Amino acid sequence: MKVLITGAKGMLGQDMVAEFQRRDYEIHAADHKALDITDIHAVRKVIEALRPDVVVNCAAYTNVDKAESEPEVAMRVNGLGPRNLALACGATGAVLLHISTDYVFDGEKEGPYEIWDAPNPINAYGKSKLWGENYVRSLMHRYFIVRTSWLFGKGGRNFVTTMLELAKRGEPIRVVNDQRGCPTYTVDLAKACADLVESGCYGIYHVTNQGATTWYEFAREVFKIASVSVALEPVSTRDFPRPADRPRNSVLSAFPLENEVGYKPPTWKESLFIYLLNAQPKRTQNSERNW
């Protein structure tokens, strides 16, 4: 099977490439320089030339706060980009797996969001991602839309690395404690995506590590596993204003993922431990522990 992966140098893209390579597929990894998904002519040219069986779209505009001041840029990448891929895939018969987000929901639901719950994004980033979903759904029959959340992985900057960098300053750290979601390890997400592709069961899926938490509780677990002592203070969203509103609850239900691939991803605490263990530098005789 021939697989084209966009956004291949991003945090998720790198693990997606590694996962499909592990399965001995023919991989074509395209970063932004190799393929700008906002350019419909470039997208059509590349996909018509390669004729991939599957296109995995990891390319995205992910700066949630900055999207408030440049919504058209976010829409070009997150909305028109998936549209371009869907049109090109439809013309060649390729399957499209598109990565979306928990931020398509408004956060007002008390329990986990199901795949059939109506999206209602409350920020520009979420709106752009929803339009990407809508284009894929309206233009294709064979597609996967995979919503995920709170990503961390070795291929890029994320919440975990940010917390550990802040801890080095020796100052108190304030983290919001009234937004709930599901941290997700990019390695686990990539594996589930590859398994979904192999299942042939098209549709919308929610893929996260299991268990819900807050950003504060997430940070506390990071410091616990890394054996870092820091003054950590829980605060409310009201006390920590940002340009973009965040949903207070963006927990995603895993149904029906287990039905199609035969398992649920590990808990976020298990995967966070593995991530931090692998991120730890090798020690020499005179080295100090350093995460």
Image: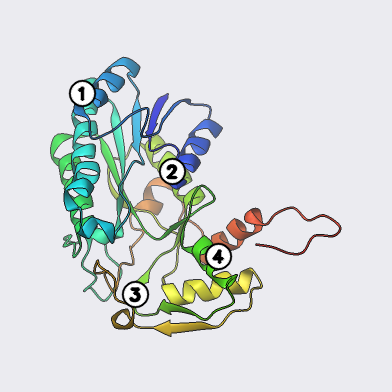
Residue position marked by numbered label 1 in the rendering = 41
Is 174 on the left or on the right of 161, as rendered? left
Which callout, 4 or 2, points to the residue nearer the camera? 4
Q: Is residue 270 above or below residue 201?
A: below
- Residue density around tag 3, few if under 14, some if 14–19, many if 20 or more, within 10 Å: some
Instruction: Give the number of the mark in front: 4 or 3.
Output: 4
- In the picture, the disc for residue 179 is 3
Q: Residue at x 28, y 82 (%)?
A: 238
Amino acid at pointer 4: Glu
Mark 2 residue type:
Gly
Label 4, on which residue?
A: 165
Q: Quadrant of residue 126?
A: bottom left
Task: Tell me the CA gap for discs 3 and 2.
Answer: 25 Å
Depth check: 289 or 140 in front?
Answer: 289
Local SS, label 4? helix
Residues packed near mark 2 inside 10 Å, few (<14), some (14 to 19) or many (20 plus):
some
- Marks 1 and 3, how far apart at CA: 40 Å
Q: Is residue 32 left or right of residue 103?
A: right
Of callouts 1 and 3, the N-terminal one: 1
At x 26%, y 26%, the residue is 43
Give the spatial CA distance, label 4 vs label 2: 20 Å
Mark 4 vs mark 1: in front = 4
Determine the CA span between mark 4 and mark 3. Answer: 22 Å
Q: Quadrant of residue 119?
A: bottom left
Using the numbered discs, state the Cα–Cα distance from disc 1 to disc 2 in whole angstroms.
23 Å
Amino acid at dot 3: Gln
Is the Cβ of the residue at disc 1 closer than 8 Å to that at disc 2? no
Find numbered disc 2 in the image and state the secondary structure of the residue it sits on: loop
User: Which residue bears the numbered disc 2?
Assistant: 10
